[in-house]
C-alpha cells in the first residue's frame, strides 16, 4: 500500500518484509498467529537466523508464550510441509517463493537454534545491548542490575527531609499538606521520583490568569450581597434566627459574622461560623434562595484561596522532587546499580546522542528485523530506541509494530498512546486484522454495535478519540467458541415482558438497576455503595443460575469459566463479599496489595520483636497474643493465675530457644517452626493468611543474606512495613488456583479470555482529577508529555480528557474478554453519564440511560439484551431466581470416637533423651544406686596448679572465654562457615562475633583467629592407622559436610535396649561412669532427628565429629583422655555419638549403595574439645577419638529398629 493510504486488511503472506509496518490487532483477531507467520517468512524468504530476528514484548510470560508458539509453528511446518502447502493459502503462497529443500533445511536449523532466539522483553533487550556493548553504551563494566531500588529511593527521600527538618518554616509547609514523612512522599509521588521527565509547577500567575477578576471582583460582590441581605434583615430574623427554639444565639452569631465578612474589604476567607448561614438545610426555600449567591461566592473564593495558598508548598515540593531525583541517581551511581527504568532511558539517550551512530550500527547489524508485540503499551523512550535503529523506508531493515490502540490501558504504568500515534504517523505501512477467531458471532456483533456507535449499516462514530478509528470486526463460524456453543434455558425460553425487555439472555446482556428499595443515604438518597451492592447481588444470583443450568457444549459450566471484571480492589471486595455470602468459591486474581501492608505483616512484626526482646514482658505478651504464636485469651489469663509464674518462665524459655534457632540456623527455620507448630490463621481466610505468612518468611530469608544480624534484619523488616514499596516481588500472591470464579481487574484481564464475563459496575464514574497533586497530561500543541505539580484549568482538562478516553479503551478490553456472553451492569451512579459506558452510548445526562439501553436492544438483531432488575436481593443474602424454597438446615454433631488415639509417635533426639535424664534425676533422689546415673554436675576447678586465678587476663583466650552456650554458639558458627584449607577469617568471624554478647568483642578477634588456626594445625591421630595423623587444615571444603541434618525412623525402640547397647559400648573403657537409667516411655516410636556438627572424609573413610567448647580447666593438662571420657559419659555424649553413627551408617548405605563396606568406609568418631587443642601439645590433648566396629554397628542398628539393607 502507499505511505499515505489508510489502513488495509492484513495478509501475512503478502506484506513487504522491509520498512516500517504498524499492524492494528483488534481483540481476538489472531495476533500471535500472524506474528508466527511473519517470523516464518523472515526465516525462509529473507534467510535470517533466529538470532537475527528480534522479537520483543512486555512481560516474561509473553516471551515464553511466543517462544513456544514459534516452536510449534516451526515444527508443524517442517513436519507437515506438503499437507500445509496443499490446504493452507498462506503456505501455498510461501511455497511459490521458496525452494522446498531449502525451506526445510532452514526450519530444521531454526529448531536446533531456537534456544538462542532473540525473543526478549523490552527490558531484557536493553540489558543485553548494554551488557554486550558496554564500551559503546558508556556503562561501567562492573555495574549490576537491581530489580528493587526502593531502599535507595527511600534513603534519598530521608536525606532531603532531614535537611528540611532543620528549617521550621519549610517543614510546616510540608506538614500542612501531609507531605512531611517519607511514607507520604513515596505514596503520592513515588512514580514521579523515579522519572527523569521535565517537571513544572503551577504558578500564582497561571492561577490568576484562569480567573483574573476573581480577587478584584470579590469586594464589590461582597458589598452587593451585603446590601441585598441587609434589606431583608427582618425576614432573616423571623425566618432564620428566631425560627427554631434553642438555636437563636448560634444563628444570630452566624448572621453577625456573615455581615462582618461581607463588609470587610480586606478579608478574603469566610469565617467558619459565618458559613452556618448557608449550611442550614431546614431554612425555608424562598429564604434559602437569597443565600445561594453567598454560597457560590464562598465556594469560588475557597477554591481560589486553596490554589494560591498551596503554591509555596508546591514550589518547595518541586524543589524537593528534583533534589530527591538527583540524590537517587547519586546513590545508584555510588552502589553501581541500575534498575529497569534506567535500562531503557540510558539506551535511548545513548542511541540518540551525537556519538550514538556506532551503537546504532551494531544493533542494526545484529538485529536487522524487529517484531514488537503489544506495541500500544510503548512509551516515548522505547519508541525513541526503535525510531533510531529502524529508519523509515529502509530496504535492509524491517520493523513490525503490532498492537491495538483500543487496548492502550496502561497509562499509569508508563504506556503512552501518543507514542503509538506518533509511530503510526511515521509508519510506511498500516494494516489491521479484522476477523475475530475467539468469540461467537453474536458477541462480536454486539460489541461492534456498542463501539461502532450506530447500527452496522450507518456511519461509524469515533468513540475512542485521538483519531483512533474503530474498524468493524468480522466473525467466523470457525471461531474457537463456536465449537462449544453455550446452552442456557433463558437463552431459549425467556419471555417477552411487553416493555421492550424480556427474560432472555443475549450475548451482550445489560442489566439496569433503576431504584434502591432501602437507600442508606441522608434524605433517602442512595449512596454509591447501595448501587454497587444491588448490582453485585444480582450478578451473584445470575452466576448461581448459570452454574445450575448452563452448559458449554456437552460440559456443565464450571466456576472457572466465569470472570467478574472490576476497576479496583474496592469493587472486587464488594463482589467477593457477595460471593462468600452465597457460598460461591471465588478468588481475586489481581490483588496488587503489598504484602507488607497485610494484617499478617503487622502480626509478624510483633512476633519478631517479641522474640528478639523476650526479656521485655510487654513485648513478649504482645507476641504471644498473636495467631502466629497460637495466642488466645485463655492462655494469656493463665499467666496471671497463682501458679502462672512457672508457666510464664517456661514459655519465655521456649521463646529464647526460638531466638537461638534464629541466631544459629536463620530466620526461615524459626518461622517455619512457628507456622508448623503454632500458627492458627483466621478460619474465614486461612489460605490467604498462610500464603501471606509464607511470602513474608521468604522475603525475610532473602533479606537475611544482606542483613545478617537479627536486629538488622528486624529493622529492615520494620522499615518495609512502615514504608511499603509497590514492587512486583512484594505484591500479594495468589492463595489458590483451584476451580474458582475469577474476580479480575479490567487492567489485569487484558490478553485473557473467559466464556462468561460480568462487568457489574460499568456505569460507575470516578473523577480522574479528584485529589491529584500531580497532573500528567500531553500538551495539546505538540503532544509532548508533561508532569505538573499542582493543577490549573488547562492541565486538569487535558488530564480528564485523556483519562476519559482511556476508560473507554478499558471498557473495550473488558467486553472483548468474553467468548460466549458478557453481562454489563448499569445504575444511575453520580455522573454516570460520564462513565466509559455512558460516553460510549453518547449520553448527555442520567435520564437517558433507559431509552439508550432500550434502543440498543431493539436495533441489535437479538445480540444485545436489556433487563431491569430489583435491589431486593441486596437486602439479604443473594438468592438466585431459580433457587425456590430455602434449604432446611439440620443440626450437625460430631461422631463419637470409638477407638483409642495412638499418641505414642515422637520426634526423638539426643537432646530430648538427655533432657529427660537430667530432669528425672531431680525427681528421683531415693532410687537405688543401680538405677541411677552418676552425673558430674561440677566441672573441673577453674584454677589449676601453676595458674593464678587472681590474674585471669593473663590466661589465653581459650581459657578465659565466657563459659556456657554463647561461647559454644560462637565457635560452632565460625567453624561451620570456615573452609579449613583456605580460611578467610574476616568473612566468617565478624557476624558471629557481633552476636556474641560481650563488651569489647572487637578486641577478641586477633586472639580468636590465632586460637582457631592453632586448632586447625593440631595433629589428630587417624583412627585405625597407628602412627598416622592429619589436621583439620588439610580438609578441603569438598571433603566435609557441615551441620548435617538427619531423620531416620524409630519403630518400637525399647529403652532397656538403648541402655543395654550403651552399657555394652562403655564396657570397653576401664573408666565407666556409674550405672545407667533412661526415664520416659518404655518404647519409642517416631523419628530420630539431629544435626551433626561435621562429617568429613580422610583416605576414603568417613568420620562423625562434634565440637565442644566445654571448660575443663585453665591448663592443657586438664584436657587429657581421662577428663574427656569422664565428661562425655557424664553428659551422655556417647549416646549422642552412637545416634550420629547410626545416622551416618544409613547415609553412607543410601549414597554408596552396594559398594558400601563398613570396614572400608566407616571411620569412627571424633569429639574436639577446642579449648584443649593445640599444635604445640606433645600429646593429642583435647581430642577424643573412638572407633566403632562393624559388628557393634549391626547391634546398634538392630536396637534402632532398622538395618540398612545395603550395609555389608
Image (cartoon, helix red, strand yellow):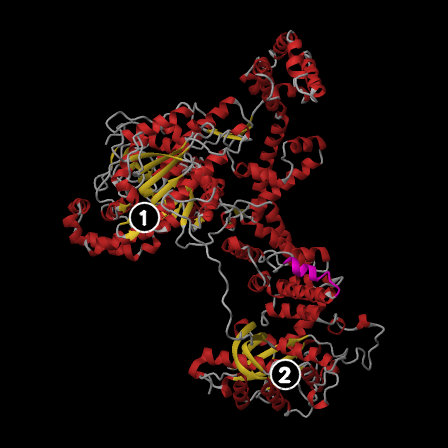
Give the alpha-carbon distance from disc 2 to disc 1, as whole Å. Answer: 71 Å
Q: Is residue 444 magenta?
A: no
For the point 61% across and 13% down, the residue is: 218
Mark 1, residue position:
549
Who is closer to the viewer here, 563 or 314?
563
Residue 315 in the image, given as x and y percentages of width and height: 61, 28
Q: Earlier in the sequence, mark 2 or mark 1?
A: 1
Give the mark toward the camera: 2 or 1. Answer: 1
What segment carries the magenta color? 632-642
Q: Which image quarter is the N terminus in?
A: top left
Q: Determine crowd level at label 1: few under 14, some 14-19, many 20+ residues with C-alpha closer than 10 A.
A: some
Q: How many marks?
A: 2
Who is closer to the viewer here, 821 or 402?
821
For the point 43% across and 24% down, the residue is: 780
Query: Which picture quadrant has residue 1064?
Result: bottom right
Query: Which picture quadrant has residue 663?
Result: bottom right
Mark 2, residue position:
1134
Q: Is residue 1199 visible?
A: yes
Residue 423 in the image, given as x and y percentages of width and height: 36, 33
Who is closer to the viewer here, 687 or 1058?
687
Residue 340 in the image, given as x and y percentages of width and height: 48, 45
| Side of 1045 relative to 245 (left or right) | left
- Judging from the image, what secondary structure is the residue with disc 2 in? helix
| Side of 811 relative to 731 (left or right) | left
Which residue is the extreme one toward the left? Answer: 86
Label pair 2/1, CB-CB below 8 angstroms: no
- Judging from the image, what secondary structure is the residue with disc 1 in? helix
Amino acid at each position: 500500500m502507499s505511505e499515505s493510504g489508510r489502513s488495509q486488511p492484513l495478509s501475512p503472506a503478502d506484506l513487504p518484509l522491509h520498512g516500517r509496518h504498524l499492524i492494528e490487532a483488534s481483540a481476538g483477531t489472531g495476533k500471535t498467529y500472524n506474528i508466527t507467520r511473519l517470523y516464518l517468512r523472515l526465516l525462509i524468504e529473507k534467510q535470517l537466523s533466529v538470532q537475527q530476528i528480534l522479537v520483543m514484548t512486555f512481560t516474561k510470560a509473553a516471551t515464553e508464550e511466543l517462544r513456544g508458539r514459534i516452536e510449534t509453528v516451526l515444527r508443524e511446518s517442517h513436519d507437515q510441509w506438503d499437507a500445509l502447502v496443499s490446504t493452507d493459502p498462506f503456505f501455498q503462497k510461501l511455497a511459490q517463493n521458496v525452494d522446498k529443500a531449502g525451506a526445510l533445511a532452514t526450519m530444521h536449523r531454526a529448531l536446533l537454534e531456537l534456544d538462542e532466539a532473540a525473543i526478549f522483553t523490552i527490558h531484557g533487550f536493553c540489558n543485553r545491548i548494554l551488557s554486550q556493548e558496554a564500551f559503546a553504551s558508556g556503562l561501567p563494566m562492573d555495574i549490576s542490575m537491581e530489580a528493587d531500588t526502593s531502599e535507595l529511593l527511600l534513603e534519598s527521600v530521608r536525606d532531603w527531609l532531614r535537611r528540611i527538618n532543620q528549617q521550621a518554616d519549610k517543614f510546616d509547609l510540608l506538614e500542612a499538606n501531609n507531605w512531611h514523612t517519607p511514607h507520604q512522599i513515596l505514596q503520592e509521588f513515588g512514580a514521579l521520583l523515579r522519572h527523569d521527565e521535565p517537571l513544572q509547577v503551577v504558578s500564582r500567575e497561571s492561577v490568576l490568569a484562569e480567573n483574573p477578576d476573581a480577587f478584584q471582583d470579590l469586594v464589590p460582590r461582597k458589598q452587593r450581597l451585603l446590601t441585598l441581605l441587609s434589606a431583608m434583615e427582618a425576614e432573616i430574623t423571623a425566618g432564620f434566627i428566631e425560627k427554631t427554639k434553642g438555636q437563636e444565639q448560634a444563628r444570630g452569631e452566624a448572621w453577625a459574622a456573615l455581615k462582618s465578612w461581607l463588609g470587610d474589604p480586606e478579608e478574603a476567607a469566610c469565617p467558619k461560623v459565618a458559613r452556618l448561614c448557608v449550611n442550614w438545610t431546614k431554612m425555608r426555600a424562598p429564604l434559602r434562595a437569597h443565600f445561594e449567591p453567598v454560597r457560590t461566592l464562598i465556594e469560588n473564593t475557597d477554591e481560589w484561596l486553596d490554589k494560591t495558598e498551596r503554591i509555596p508548598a508546591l514550589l518547595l515540593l518541586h524543589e524537593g522532587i528534583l533534589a530527591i531525583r538527583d540524590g537517587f541517581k547519586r546513590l545508584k551511581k555510588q552502589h553501581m546499580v541500575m534498575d529497569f527504568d534506567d535500562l531503557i532511558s540510558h539506551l535511548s539517550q545513548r542511541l540518540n546522542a551525537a556519538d550514538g551512530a556506532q551503537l546504532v550500527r551494531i544493533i542494526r547489524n545484529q538485529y536487522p528485523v524487529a517484531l514488537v508485540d503489544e506495541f500500544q503499551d510503548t512509551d516515548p523512550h522505547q519508541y525513541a530506541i526503535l525510531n533510531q535503529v529502524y529508519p523509515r523506508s529502509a530496504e535492509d531493515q524491517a520493523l513490525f509494530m503490532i498492537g491495538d490502540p483500543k487496548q492502550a490501558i496502561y497509562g499509569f504504568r508508563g504506556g503512552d498512546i501518543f507514542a503509538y500515534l506518533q509511530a503510526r504517523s511515521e509508519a510506511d505501512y498500516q494494516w489491521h486484522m479484522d476477523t475475530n477467531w475467539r468469540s461467537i458471532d453474536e458477541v462480536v456483533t454486539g460489541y461492534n454495535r456498542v463501539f461502532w456507535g450506530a447500527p452496522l449499516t450507518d456511519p461509524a462514530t469515533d468513540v475512542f478519540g485521538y483519531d483512533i478509528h474503530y474498524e468493524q470486526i468480522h466473525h467466523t463460524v470457525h471461531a474457537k467458541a463456536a465449537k462449544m456453543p453455550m446452552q442456557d434455558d433463558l437463552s431459549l425460553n425467556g419471555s417477552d415482558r411487553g416493555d421492550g425487555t424480556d427474560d432472555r439472555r443475549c450475548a451482550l446482556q445489560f442489566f439496569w438497576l433503576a431504584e434502591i428499595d432501602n437507600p442508606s443515604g441522608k434524605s433517602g438518597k442512595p449512596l454509591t455503595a447501595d448501587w454497587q451492592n444491588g448490582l453485585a447481588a444480582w450478578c451473584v444470583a445470575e452466576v448461581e443460575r448459570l452454574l445450575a443450568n448452563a452448559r458449554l457444549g456437552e460440559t456443565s459450566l464450571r466456576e472457572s469459566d466465569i470472570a467478574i471484571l472490576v476497576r479496583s480492589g474496592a469493587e472486587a471486595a464488594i463482589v467477593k463479599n457477595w460471593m462468600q455470602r452465597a457460598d460461591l468459591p471465588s478468588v481475586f486474581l489481581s490483588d496488587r496489595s503489598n504484602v507488607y501492608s497485610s494484617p499478617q505483616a503487622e502480626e509478624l512484626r510483633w512476633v519478631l520483636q517479641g522474640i528478639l526482646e523476650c526479656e521485655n514482658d510487654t513485648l513478649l505478651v504482645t507476641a504471644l497474643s498473636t495467631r502466629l504464636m497460637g495466642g488466645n485469651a485463655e492462655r494469656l489469663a493463665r499467666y496471671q493465675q497463682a501458679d502462672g509464674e512457672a508457666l510464664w518462665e517456661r514459655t519465655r524459655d521456649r521463646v529464647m530457644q526460638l531466638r537461638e534457632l534464629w541466631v544459629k540456623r536463620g530466620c526461615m527455620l524459626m518461622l517455619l517452626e512457628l507456622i508448623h507448630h503454632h500458627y492458627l490463621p483466621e478460619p474465614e481466610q486461612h489460605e490467604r493468611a498462610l500464603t501471606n505468612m509464607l511470602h513474608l518468611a521468604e522475603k525475610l530469608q532473602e533479606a537475611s543474606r544482606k542483613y545478617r544480624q537479627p536486629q538488622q534484619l528486624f529493622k529492615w523488616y520494620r522499615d518495609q512495613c512502615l514504608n511499603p514499596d509497590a514492587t512486583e516481588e512484594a505484591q500479594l500472591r495468589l492463595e489458590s488456583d483451584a476451580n474458582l470464579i475469577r474476580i479480575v481487574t479490567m487492567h489485569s484481564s487484558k490478553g485473557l479470555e473467559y466464556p462468561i464475563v460480568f462487568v457489574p459496575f460499568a456505569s460507575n464514574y470516578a473523577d480522574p482529577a479528584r485529589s491529584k497533586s500531580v497532573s500528567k497530561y500531553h500538551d495539546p500543541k505538540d503532544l509532548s508529555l508533561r508532569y505538573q505539580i499542582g493543577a490549573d484549568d488547562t492541565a486538569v482538562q487535558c488530564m480528564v480528557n485523556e483519562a476519559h478516553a482511556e476508560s473507554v479503551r478499558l471498557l473495550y478490553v473488558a467486553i472483548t474478554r468474553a467468548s460466549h456472553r458478557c453481562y454489563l451492569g448499569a445504575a444511575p451512579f453520580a455522573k454516570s453519564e460520564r462513565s466509559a459506558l455512558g460516553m460510549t452510548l453518547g449520553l448527555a445526562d442520567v435520564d437517558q440511560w433507559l431509552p439508550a439501553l432500550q434502543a440498543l436492544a431493539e436495533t441489535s438483531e437479538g445480540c444485545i439484551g436489556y433487563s431491569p432488575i430489583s435491589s431486593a436481593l441486596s437486602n439479604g443474602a443473594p438468592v438466585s431466581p431459580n433457587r425456590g424454597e430455602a434449604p432446611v438446615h439440620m443440626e450437625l454433631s460430631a461422631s463419637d470416637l470409638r477407638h483409642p488415639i495412638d499418641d505414642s509417635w515422637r520426634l526423638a533426639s539426643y537432646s530430648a533423651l538427655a533432657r529427660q535424664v537430667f530432669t528425672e534425676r531431680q525427681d528421683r533422689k531415693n532410687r537405688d544406686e543401680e538405677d541411677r546415673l552418676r552425673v558430674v554436675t561440677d566441672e573441673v576447678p577453674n584454677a589449676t596448679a601453676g595458674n593464678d586465678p587472681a590474674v585471669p587476663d593473663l590466661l589465653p583466650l581459650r581459657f578465659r572465654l565466657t563459659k556456657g552456650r554463647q561461647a559454644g554458639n560462637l565457635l560452632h558458627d565460625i567453624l561451620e562457615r570456615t573452609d579449613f584449607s583456605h580460611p578467610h577469617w574476616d568473612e566468617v568471624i565478624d557476624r558471629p562475633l557481633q552476636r556474641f554478647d560481650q563488651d569489647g568483642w572487637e578486641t577478641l578477634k586477633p586472639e580468636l583467629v590465632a586460637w582457631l588456626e592453632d586448632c586447625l594445625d593440631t595433629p589428630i591421630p587417624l583412627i585405625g592407622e597407628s602412627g598416622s595423623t592429619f589436621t583439620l587444615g588439610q580438609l578441603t571444603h569438598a571433603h566435609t559436610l557441615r551441620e548435617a541434618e538427619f531423620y531416620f525412623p524409630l519403630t518400637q525402640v525399647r529403652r532397656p535396649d538403648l541402655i543395654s547397647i550403651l552399657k555394652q559400648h562403655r564396657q570397653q573403657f576401664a573408666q565407666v561412669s556409674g550405672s545407667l537409667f533412661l526415664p520416659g516411655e518404655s518404647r519409642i516410636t517416631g523419628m530420630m532427628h539431629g544435626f551433626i556438627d561435621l562429617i568429613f572424609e580422610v583416605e576414603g573413610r568417613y568420620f562423625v565429629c562434634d565440637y565442644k567448647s566445654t571448660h575443663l580447666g585453665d591448663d592443657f593438662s586438664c584436657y587429657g583422655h581421662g577428663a574427656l571420657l569422664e565428661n562425655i559419659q557424664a553428659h551422655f555424649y556417647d549416646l549422642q555419638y552412637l545416634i550420629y553413627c547410626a545416622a551416618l551408617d544409613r547415609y553412607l548405605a543410601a549414597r554408596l549403595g552396594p559398594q558400601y563396606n563398613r570396614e572400608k568406609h566407616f571411620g569412627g568418631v571424633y569429639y574436639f574439645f577446642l579449648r584443649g587443642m593445640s599444635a604445640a601439645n606433645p600429646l593429642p590433648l583435647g581430642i577424643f577419638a573412638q572407633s566403632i566396629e562393624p559388628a557393634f554397628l549391626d547391634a546398634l542398628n538392630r536396637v534402632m529398629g532398622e538395618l540398612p539393607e545395603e550395609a555389608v
